[in-house]
Image (cartoon, helix red, strand yellow):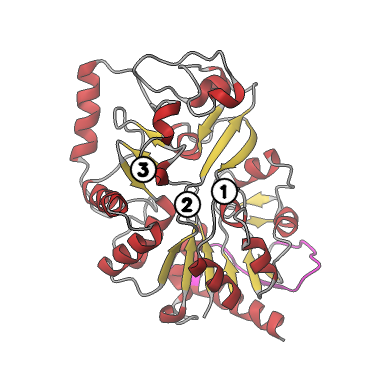
């Protein structure tokens, strides 16, 4: 009964073919929640939702985001109203006090719906509203995720990495043009880094004045066009992996898909007890690189910015708990652990099944 560590699109793509190799009824998926963001009062959990929507048969696979065929009337009307009202462009990060007031699950990741910078479909929005309402009723994120999974008839067990808030924040280099675009106080960071930053009156400013931004602002709004100085998992030191997550990891085996090692998997393994649990079970990881070439996304820049070599060798160093690796056939990296090679590009379910079979083969080398 394998447990997959999931974030971004790498592991969800692998899951699309995993059912041919691993029984879904005995499969657990632990999803990163460091990318979660609150927009206008509702909590969006992108990495949970990618698995929820894909395994529920409704994911928009063209973008690997949102629900296929969704309408966007509410999002478009918000934009029209903001234009008519003459509101400044976003993202509009709420001020420091608002970041930590009220709903604790959304700490350090709250944005106004004015100038909604992520395109949220109408059916997609209903999921987020239900999630947030159930949280407000006192349920944990784990409990809410189980309820949503039942609603989408999921065939796997889906778990958030924690019931506590963790926010992935990107620290931009002072040389970054984006870091120079000051629109007010870097909300939520003023007390730590800048006592004299000015707060935009009645609006929440972006973190840009101090070069700090939420991962979703970095990835969605800025298209990763930022020179990265560092990555912070705010709240990880105080957050806890749930008992369900730790039990799933200890029961193993664990498969780490080709997700971004820094922002998709990093928040998860930053939680107390997770790395230790991974050291105690059989772990196979799929590299998101072919030697020093990343398949997609900003993993290379993020690894470089956090002091890691942006390559398969760098991934292996970061995943010191991994017992074996699945590498692409074109990847000649020599590792100190067993390696199974296959074509790791995944464009469809058949590709994913091939990589899943390689994962199963790699697990056999560990068990043997």
> Disc 3 to disc 2, how far (Cα)?
11 Å
* Element carrying mark 2: loop
Q: Is residue 347 visible?
A: no
Q: Going 39% across and 28% down the picture, which residue do you hit?
A: 94
Q: Does the CB distance between marks 3 and 2 fall below 8 Å? A: no
Dot 1: within a 10 Å radius of its alpha carbon, few (fewer than 14), some, or many (20 or more) residues?
A: few
For the C terminus, the quadrant is: bottom right
Residue, disc 2:
164
Of marks 3 and 1, which one's residue comes earlier in the chain? 3
Q: Nearer the viewer, residue 5 or 259?
A: 5
Q: Nearer the viewer, residue 354 or 170?
A: 170
Quarter where residue 364 is shown: bottom right
Residue 154 in magenta? no
Residue 336 in magenta? yes
Q: In the figure, is residue 49 to the left or right of 241?
A: left
* Element carrying mark 1: loop
Residue, disc 3:
103
Rendered image: mark on residue 321: none
Q: In the figure, is residue 266 to the left or right of 204?
A: right
Q: Nearer the viewer, residue 335 or 170?
A: 170
Q: Does the CB distance between marks 2 and 1 fall below 8 Å? A: yes
> Disc 3 to disc 1, how far (Cα)?
16 Å
Q: In the figure, is residue 107 to the left or right of 212?
A: left
Over which residues does the magenta segment extend? Answer: 331-352
Residue at the far bottom: name it: 368
Query: 68 above or below 26?
Result: above
């Amino acid at each position: 009964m394998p447990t997959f560590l999931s974030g971004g699109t790498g592991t969800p793509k692998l899951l699309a073919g995993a059912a041919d190799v691993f029984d879904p009824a005995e499969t657990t998926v632990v999803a990163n929640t460091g990318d979660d963001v609150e927009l206008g009062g509702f909590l969006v959990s992108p990495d949970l939702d990618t698995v929820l929507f894909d395994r529920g048969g409704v994911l928009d696979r063209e973008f690997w985001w949102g629900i296929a065929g969704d309408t966007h009337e509410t999002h478009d009307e918000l934009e029209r109203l903001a234009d008519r009202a003459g509101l400044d462009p976003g993202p509009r990060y709420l001020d420091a006090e608002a970041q930590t007031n009220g709903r604790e699950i959304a700490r350090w990741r709250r944005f106004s719906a004015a100038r909604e910078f992520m395109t949220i479909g109408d059916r997609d929005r209903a999921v987020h509203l239900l999630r947030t309402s159930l949280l407000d009723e006192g349920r944990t994120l784990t409990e809410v995720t189980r309820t949503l999974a039942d609603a989408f008839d999921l065939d796997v067990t889906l778990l958030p990495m924690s019931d506590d808030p963790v926010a992935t924040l990107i620290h931009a280099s002072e040389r970054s043009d984006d870091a120079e675009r000051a629109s007010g106080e870097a909300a939520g960071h003023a007390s730590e880094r800048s006592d004299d930053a000015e707060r935009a009156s009645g609006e929440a400013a972006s973190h840009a004045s101090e070069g700090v931004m939420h991962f979703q602002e970095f990835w969605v709004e800025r298209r990763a066009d930022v020179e990265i100085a560092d990555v912070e998992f705010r709240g990880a030191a105080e957050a806890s992996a749930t008992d369900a997550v730790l039990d799933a990891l200890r029961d193993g085996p664990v498969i780490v898909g080709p997700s971004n090692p820094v922002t998709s998997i990093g928040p998860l393994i930053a939680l107390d007890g997770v790395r230790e649990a991974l050291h105690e079970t059989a772990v196979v990881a799929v590299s998101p690189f072919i030697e020093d070439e990343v398949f997609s996304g900003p993993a290379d820049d993020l690894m470089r910015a956090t002091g890691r070599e942006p390559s398969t060798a760098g991934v292996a160093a970061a995943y010191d708990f991994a017992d074996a690796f699945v590498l692409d056939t074109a990847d000649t990296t020599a590792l100190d652990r067993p390696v199974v090679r296959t074509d790791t590009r995944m464009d469809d379910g058949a590709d994913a099944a091939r990589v899943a079979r390689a994962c199963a083969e790699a697990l056999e080398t560990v068990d043997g």
